[in-house]
């Protein structure tokens, strides 16, 4: 049986995707920039770097499919071009290698940030959006990377794109920005909140959505993999119910958050350390990133549970592993 290559298996969502593929009976080859970084004995680790095309040729050799989940996910970087080299050039390098190797199908992991948002409403895969709507180097690089993936599909190479929303759940080791919000809440480091909104989904179920896209997705199409649209206040209230810790009641004006982001990011440029409040994150928070996964439900039979599932899994995992 031919293996399936999963990039990003040492990370949060990528690990869940790798475990889902493995659970469906296919051997998984995991791309690793550093030896031993994957940390899962059930996965075949293969050395490679998205910025090194020759290493990718070796990684995809003999594979029947590729799940490209890896990305440079930073809302601040001292050298923003690093994000473009990994996310845009790296995606192109990997798809070129996969096409040369005769890979049968690729599932490319984009982001909900590449979906157009409707002020006061809910966006979907058809909502108009352009590069100028992208805030910061991360979102711009992912938008351009998604365009690369869909270009390969237009040229006849079978690529399906999925757009996860805000996955939460177990094994968020780093943690992700959404996971860090949960950790801050559990640790009592969130005295106030801003008026924003997210679509929250359990990471394991989002990973199952990747598998469904592999089975049923149409090449050249995008599929939102999310669950429930919630305001940040609603998320914090659910976390309070799950953990027993009080939710903050003070709403911070967006202008105050913007000032904090400006000072925090300016300090980061001087020290080289990531800012506590990235300016791009504050700018993103001005919009409620609410979307519909109706297309994935209709075409992929994607049926996620409510956001509380992922929030509970995240709380339990962070508590069990000493994050708070």
Image (cartoon, rainbow, N blue to C red):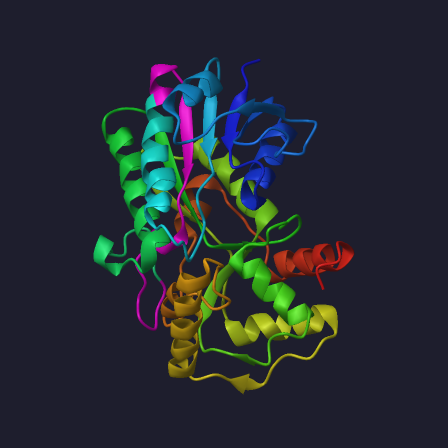
List the single residue furthest toward the right: 320
Residue 122 located left or right of residue 186? left
Observer-nearest of 18 and 179: 179
The structure residue drawn at horizontal position 32% and vertical position 41%, both measured from the top left corner, is 145
Residue 137: % across, % down = 33, 53
Q: Position of residue 196 (x, y in %)?
A: 44, 73
Q: Is residue 86 left or right of residue 220?
A: right
Q: Is residue 29 visible?
A: yes
Residue 157 % position (x, y): 31, 24
Q: At which x and y percent is residue 125? A: 32, 51
On whether residue 194 falls in the magenta region, the answer is no
Marks counted in the figure total 0
Q: Is residue 314 above or below residue 193?
A: above
Q: The N terminus lies in which quarter of the figure?
A: top right
The reply, left or right, for residue 81 in relation to residue 307 is: left
- Residue 130 visible, this orientation: no
Magenta segment: does it hold 109? yes
Residues shaded magenta:
97-122
Picture residue at 62% right of the left edge, 28% below the top:
22
Viewer-closest of 113 and 122:
113
Q: Quadrant of residue 217?
A: top left
Vertical placement of residue 26 versus 74, above or below: above
Task: Residue at the far bottom: name it.
Answer: 250
Quadrant (top left/top right/bottom left/bottom right) for the C terminus: bottom right
Q: In terms of image quadrants, where is residue 24? A: top right
Against 12, residue 242 (above or below) is below
């Amino acid at each position: 049986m031919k293996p399936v290559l999963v990039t990003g298996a040492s990370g949060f969502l990528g690990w869940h995707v790798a475990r889902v593929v493995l659970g469906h009976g296919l051997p998984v080859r995991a791309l690793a920039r550093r030896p031993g970084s994957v940390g899962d004995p059930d996965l075949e680790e293969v050395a490679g770097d998205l910025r090194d095309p020759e290493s990718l040729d070796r990684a995809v050799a003999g594979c029947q499919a590729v799940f490209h989940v890896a990305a440079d996910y930073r809302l601040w970087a001292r050298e923003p071009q690093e994000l473009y080299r990994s996310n845009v050039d790296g995606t192109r390098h990997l798809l070129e290698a996969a096409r040369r190797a005769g890979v049968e199908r690729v599932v490319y992991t984009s982001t909900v940030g590449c979906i157009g948002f409707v002020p006061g409403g809910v966006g979907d895969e058809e909502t108009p959006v352009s590069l100028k709507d992208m805030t910061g180097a991360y979102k711009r690089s992912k938008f351009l990377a998604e365009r690369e993936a869909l270009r390969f599909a237009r040229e006849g190479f079978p690529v399906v794109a999925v757009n996860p929303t805000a996955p939460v759940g177990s094994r968020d080791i780093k943690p992700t920005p959404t996971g860090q919000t949960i950790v801050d809440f559990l640790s009592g480091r969130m005295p106030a909140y801003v008026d924003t909104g997210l679509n929250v989904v359990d990471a394991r179920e989002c990973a199952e959505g990747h598998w469904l896209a592999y089975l049923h997705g149409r090449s050249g199409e995008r599929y939102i993999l999310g669950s429930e649209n919630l305001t940040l206040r609603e998320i914090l209230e659910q976390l309070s119910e799950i953990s027993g810790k009080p939710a903050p009641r003070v709403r911070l004006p967006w202008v105050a958050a913007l000032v904090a982001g400006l000072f925090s990011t300016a300090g980061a440029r001087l020290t080289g350390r990531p800012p506590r409040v990235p300016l791009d994150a504050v700018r993103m928070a001005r919009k409620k990133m609410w979307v519909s996964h109706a297309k994935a439900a209709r075409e992929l039979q994607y049926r996620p549970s409510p956001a509380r599932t992922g929030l509970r899994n995240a709380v339990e995992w962070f508590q069990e592993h000493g994050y708070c």
